[in-house]
Amino acid sequence: MINELIIYTLVSFLLLFLFAKISYKLNLVDLPNKRKIHTKAISYTGGIAISVILVLSISLLEISVNNLNNILSIGFLISIIGLIDDKYNLNVGNKLSLQIIPIFFLIIFENLTLNQLGDYDYFKLELGTFKIPFTLICVLFLINSFNYFDGMDGVLSFATISVLAILYFLTPNQNSQLFLIIILIPISIFLCFNFSLLRLPKMFLGDSGSLLLGFIISFLLIYFANQNLIHPILLAWSIAIFVYEFLSINIIRLRDKRNLFKAGQDHIHNILFKKTKSVFL
């Protein structure tokens, strides 16, 4: 398996490099404006590149767990939706409506639903007939909280890597650990492009990346909960930062009577950057 992972790593690098080059040719770039700190057009195809890599990993590394395969396969659709949003700036209604399609597919046809929220000795939180709408709401919530979190170089990628690392050390299942490594590799390589290390062409995740990572993490948490690999409360704590930021920003916007869906500079990474002038602090 070591040799396969080395080949997979090389393929990941080459595909990210190819997508970076092509996106500049096809004008798939994020243009600077008064809300953004970059001063030149930057490729926003990092997410779709990662999605293609993850789909290829199914055959390259022969992932044998159907539910996990389908999370990556259907994740490609959510990244396409994000790419369309990056290109044409979809309104909130259209964006959410399109997100529901791949989410609903995994919930209904793959039975990836939150059936219960954990056994706490004295009681067990069973969702019963409410499991489908509850799962749909939770996944939509988490996907868009990932989208909120993506606003500065490396922030969402590092946060996602930290979630994958937590899940890796919590799960006792080796196949699940391997699956987490498969997801982690292209995200880690993407960071080299995101920070333009060694003069690599700079890339952003774009909405295709933020929606993809939120989608994958959402259904991974559901999968781990349903397989009883990790207690649901530990799964919830692994994504606490995303939930906290999403809720706090929207509560503050509601209090101040501001538009919930208008992009702003009130995210935690913007506040920290203003104070430290660094993306690493």
Image (cartoon, grey):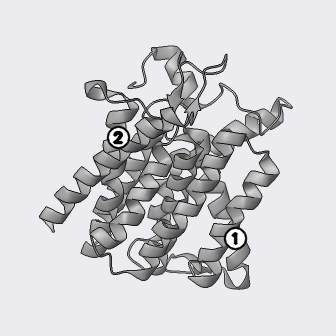
Residue tagged by mark 1? Answer: 134
The residue drawn where x is 73% and y is 85% is 129
Is residue 232 placed above or below 280 in the rendered structure?
below
Within the image, what quadrant is residue 141 found in? bottom right
**For residue 126, which quarter of the picture?**
bottom right
Residue placed at 49% from the left, 69% from the top? Answer: 73
Question: Above or below — where is 267 with respect to 148?
Answer: above
Q: Position of residue 231 (x, y in %)?
A: 44, 71
Badge 1: residue crowd in 10 Å (few <14, some 14–19, many ≥20): some
Q: Residues within 10 Å of mark 2 (few under 14, many from 20)?
A: some
Residue 259's quadrant in the figure?
top right
Distance of mark 1 from mark 2, alpha carbons? 39 Å
- Judged left or right of residue 48, residue 207 is right
Check residue 215 in the rendering and tell me which mark sits there, or answer none. Answer: none
Name which residue type carries label 2: Phe
Q: Position of residue 235 (x, y in %)?
A: 46, 63
Q: Secondary structure at mark 2?
A: helix
The disc label shown at residue 17, or none: 2
Q: Nearer the viewer, mark 1 or mark 2?
A: 2
Above or below, 203 relative to 79 = above
Residue placed farthest to the left in the image? 3
Q: Residue at x 51, y 23 (%)?
A: 272
Please name whichever residue, 211 or 47, is drawn nearer the observer in this view of the structure: 47
Task: Pick whichever, 221 or 108, lies toward us.
Answer: 108
Q: How many marks?
A: 2
Q: Earlier in the sequence, mark 1 or mark 2?
A: 2
Q: Position of residue 239 (x, y in %)?
A: 50, 53
Horizontal side of residue 123 vs 92, given as left or right: left
* Residue shown at 59% from the left, 80% from the top: 115
- Tell which of 12 and 179 is nearer to you: 12
Quadrant (top left, top right, bottom left, bottom right) of the N terminus? bottom left
Residue 7, x across and y down, in percent: 20, 58
